[in-house]
Every structure is written in structure tokens, then in C-alpha cells.
Image: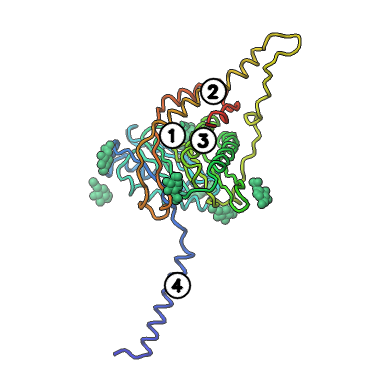
Amino acid sequence: MGSPGFNLCATTLFVLSFLISFFLSQTGTQAAPTYVYHDCQNTTTFTANSTYQSNLNRLLASFTSNANRSTGFYNTTVSSGNSVDTVYGIFLCRGDLSTDACRDCAADTTKDVVDRCPNQKVVVAWYDECMLRYSNQNIFSRMVMDPNVLLTNTGNISEPNRFGLLVRTTMDELASGVSNLGPGAKKFGAKEANFTALQKLYTLLQCTADLSGSDCHWCLMVAIMNVVDCCGGRIGARALFPSCNARFEIYPFYQPQNTSAPTPSTPALVPPPPVSVTAPEGKNKISTATIAAIVVPIAASVVFFILGYIFIIRRRKYSAVKGENDAINDMTTVESLQFDFATIEAATNKFSNDNKLGQGGFGVVYKV
Ligand SMILES: *[C@@H]1O[C@H](CO)[C@@H](O)[C@H](O)[C@H]1NC(C)=O
Ligand SMILES: *[C@@H]1O[C@H](CO)[C@@H](O)[C@H](O)[C@H]1NC(C)=O
Ligand SMILES: *[C@@H]1O[C@H](CO)[C@@H](O)[C@H](O)[C@H]1NC(C)=O
Ligand SMILES: *[C@@H]1O[C@H](CO)[C@@H](O)[C@H](O)[C@H]1NC(C)=O
Ligand SMILES: *[C@@H]1O[C@H](CO)[C@@H](O)[C@H](O)[C@H]1NC(C)=O
Ligand SMILES: *[C@@H]1O[C@H](CO)[C@@H](O)[C@H](O)[C@H]1NC(C)=O
Ligand SMILES: *[C@@H]1O[C@H](CO)[C@@H](O)[C@H](O)[C@H]1NC(C)=O
């Protein structure tokens, strides 16, 4: 038989310790990153305790110690032993994160990813706050859009056509600003727009910092086309590629105060000069410059339209992500896009070589 005094004391202690642990859990720990999606090719695996494993462990540890860089981007190579054991890695934080939040994301996701992809050599994993990627192949400065995933919020918006158009115009403008940020800069931007008096649109675009401006622009255009085509009538969607991502919602999912939208400034953003089709007085010849000004954007439009068409028709089956993670249970996978990477690579190399990208052909291409 315990005395009433003892019971009171025990109860008080219990309540106190409960309150203390509750308080600590609220303030002492950072919220864990929200898992979104991952892809591991289980065709390439390594054996436990191999050289590849130890290289990978060093790579993942270096993500955490270097995630405090101002760009939120880090790429590294770890090699020891045979060159087949070399691991290449990229870590990218969402552009509005503080360096502390970025480091926390690295610390948590580098642990999480090895549980999701044990013994996998080639991995991409996306979280709300950061993305990480590693491979046994060099993955730097290459625009890669496969594997990918398109996710949509299942809620519908009123006036879907006007909303889809607003998403497209807001993101197109933002994409130009983001891809024009200098080499090695944080290639990130977020932009708001008013939809109705009460509803706002929030958009975010980001490329990995190792991409060239034209590769970044191309990747973002494909991402934007996909989110608008599938989900312009929904209240939110995102396209996740290894090299870039696009997301829109009707609530602020980033910290607007930590975000300065890149200002359009470089020549690629200046609208192309008006093209006069009528010959000037006293001259019948249209200059080659004029012809080029007419032909190049049209040719570019045709190429992009065809490529865009290829992306749209090659849709894979739907697979629901629902239930895999409570935090995104309002999101569902719409589709996983597949396309011929060689075609894109050829097209983009060609276009970046003669530097014709950003001449204004883009806006037209995707207006279907
Ligand atoms: C990958 O692993 C899953 C489950 O372990 C298996 O069902 C699938 O066939 C594997 N795919 C390949 C390409 O090996
Ligand atoms: C790998 O090493 C750990 C600890 O060093 C050991 O516990 C484990 O059994 C080893 N696994 C294999 C497959 O050798
Ligand atoms: C990042 O953190 C490491 C220690 O973890 C420190 O040595 C380095 O100076 C920091 N870099 C920056 C840019 O803050
Ligand atoms: C990071 O990527 C660049 C290319 O964008 C490459 O030149 C550099 O060697 C990479 N850094 C490391 C440490 O691998
Ligand atoms: C935004 O910036 C402030 C101050 O720099 C920082 O305390 C806060 O954590 C940042 N927010 C995020 C999401 O990183
Ligand atoms: C949204 O619209 C689609 C197609 O119009 C419909 O299938 C879906 O059930 C709607 N979703 C909601 C949450 O109303
Ligand atoms: C949205 O509307 C508010 C007034 O309701 C205005 O102050 C703000 O500038 C508008 N934002 C944009 C991006 O147009």
C-alpha cells in the first residue's frame, strides 16, 4: 500500500517529466525533412563493406559537412582504390533554406537514403527541403531529366483555364530569370502572383548550380510544360528531375522573405526586336538578318513543339504514391515521363552551340 504522499509525488514527477519531454520535443529538435520520392536502379548494386561502400559513406558524410555553402549546392567525387569504385555526388538545398536548415537536411537525408536504397550505386532522392544524388558515373554539368516524377495535389481550382495560364506565365518569366543567373550561382527563384483577391499563386523553380544557363532553361521549360499540362487546373503540382524542379501551390511552401526573385536583366530576356516583314522604302531585298530573325524562332518553335509532343505521348502508367508518406497524402503521382535523352541532348547541344536559345521561341512553343 503506497501512501497518498508518495502517489502525489509520483504523479507530479510523471507530469513534470511528460511536460519536459514534450517541451524538448517541440523545441530541441528540427523537423525532419519531408520525403517526396526516390529512384534507385537496382541493376547496379555494390556488396556490403566493399570499397564502393566506404567511398559512398565518405561522400555522404561530406554532404553534411559541406551543406553550409552559400549556394546550397555541393558536388564531389570520392575515389580510392580502383576507378570503378569512384562515387560522384550532388547535394542541393531548396534555395530559401538557411545554411543551418540545409545542413540539417543533409544530415537527415543521407541517413534516410541508404535505408531506401540499400546497396544501390545509382540513386536520386527528393525531399521537400533538399535533393541528393549519387552515381558511379560522372553526373556533373550534365542536364539529366530521367528518372523523374510528376506529382499533383488532388484538389481542383476554380477557373482552371485562367489559373493554368497564370501558372504558365508566372513560371515562364521566372525560368528566364533563374537560368540567367551567373555560372556557379544559386539557380533558384520563387515568385508569387495574385489569382483572385483572396487566392495567391506561389511558384518555385530551381536547377542544380552546375548546369549552364541554357541547360537550366531547357530543363525548366520541360518541367513547366509538364506541370501545366497535367495539373494547371489543380491547386498544386511539381515536376522533379535530377537537374531541375518546378513546383506551384496556393499556399507559401517556401519562406518568401528568404527569397529574392531573380531580376530579368540579361539580353536573353529582352524581347526580340519587332520584325518588319514589309521591305523598307526603296529596297526590295529582305536582309539575311531579317530572314534569320524570322526563320530561327520558327525553326526553334517547331523543334521544341515536336520534342514537347514526344514527352507528352510517351507517358508511363500511373502509380500512386498515396499512403507511402502521410506528409504528402494529398499528393499523387500523375505519371512518370520517359523520353529519348539522346534527342534532347542533341537538340540542346545544337542550340547552345549557336547560342540561339532564349530568342523568344519558348513562349510560343508551349501555348497549345
Ligand atoms: C528491383 O527490386 C525489386 C524488389 O526488390 C524487384 O521486384 C525488381 O524486379 C528489381 N528490378 C530490377 C531491374 O532488378
Ligand atoms: C560489414 O562490416 C560490419 C562491421 O564492420 C559487420 O558487422 C558486417 O557483418 C559486415 N558485413 C559483411 C557482409 O561482411
Ligand atoms: C562549413 O562547416 C565547416 C565545419 O563543419 C567549416 O569548417 C566551414 O568553414 C563552414 N563553411 C562555411 C562556408 O560556413
Ligand atoms: C564539381 O563539378 C564540376 C563541374 O560542374 C567539376 O569540374 C568539379 O570537378 C566537381 N567537383 C568535384 C569535387 O568533383
Ligand atoms: C530564413 O532566414 C532566416 C534568417 O536568415 C532564418 O532564421 C530562417 O531559418 C530561414 N528560413 C529557412 C526556411 O531556412
Ligand atoms: C478534380 O477534377 C478531376 C477531373 O475533372 C476529377 O476527376 C477529380 O475527382 C476532381 N477532384 C476533386 C478533389 O474534386
Ligand atoms: C497582389 O495584390 C496586392 C493587393 O491586394 C498588391 O499589393 C500586390 O502588389 C499584388 N501582387 C502582385 C504580384 O501583383
Numbered tag placed on residue 304 in the rendering: none
Mark in the foreground, 3 or 4: 3
Amino acid type of the residue tagged 3 in the rendering: Leu
Q: Position of residue 305 (x, y in %)?
A: 50, 26
Q: Earlier in the sequence, mark 3 or mark 2?
A: 3
Mark in the foreground, 2 or 4: 2
Neighbor class of circle 4 (other Cα within 10 Å; few <14, some 14-19, many 20+) is: few
Residue at 33 percent of width and 47 percent of height: 116
Mark 4 to mark 1 CA distance (whole Å): 47 Å
Q: Earlier in the sequence, mark 3 or mark 4?
A: 4
Mark 1 to mark 2 CA distance (whole Å): 20 Å
Considering every residue shown, the one lying at the far right of the view is: 281
Q: Are marks 3 and 4 in contact (CB under 8 Å)?
A: no
Q: Secondary structure at mark 2?
A: helix
Q: Secondary structure at mark 4?
A: helix
Residue at 57 percent of width and 31 percent of height: 363
Amino acid type of the residue tagged 2 in the rendering: Ala
Q: Earlier in the sequence, mark 2 or mark 4?
A: 4
Q: Position of residue 274 (x, y in %)?
A: 68, 23
Mark in the foreground, 4 or 1: 1
Neighbor class of circle 2 (other Cα within 10 Å; few <14, some 14-19, many 20+) is: many
**Beta carbon at label 2 within 8 Å of ligand 4:** no
**Colour scheme of this structure image?**
rainbow
**Beta carbon at label 4 within 8 Å of ligand 5:** no
Q: Earlier in the sequence, mark 4 or mark 1?
A: 4
Mark 3 to mark 1 CA distance (whole Å): 10 Å
Residue identified by numbered label 1: 145
Q: Earlier in the sequence, mark 3 or mark 1?
A: 1
Q: Are marks 3 and 2 in contact (CB under 8 Å)?
A: no
Amino acid type of the residue tagged 1 in the rendering: Met
Numbered tag placed on residue 220 in the rendering: 3
Residue identified by numbered label 2: 300
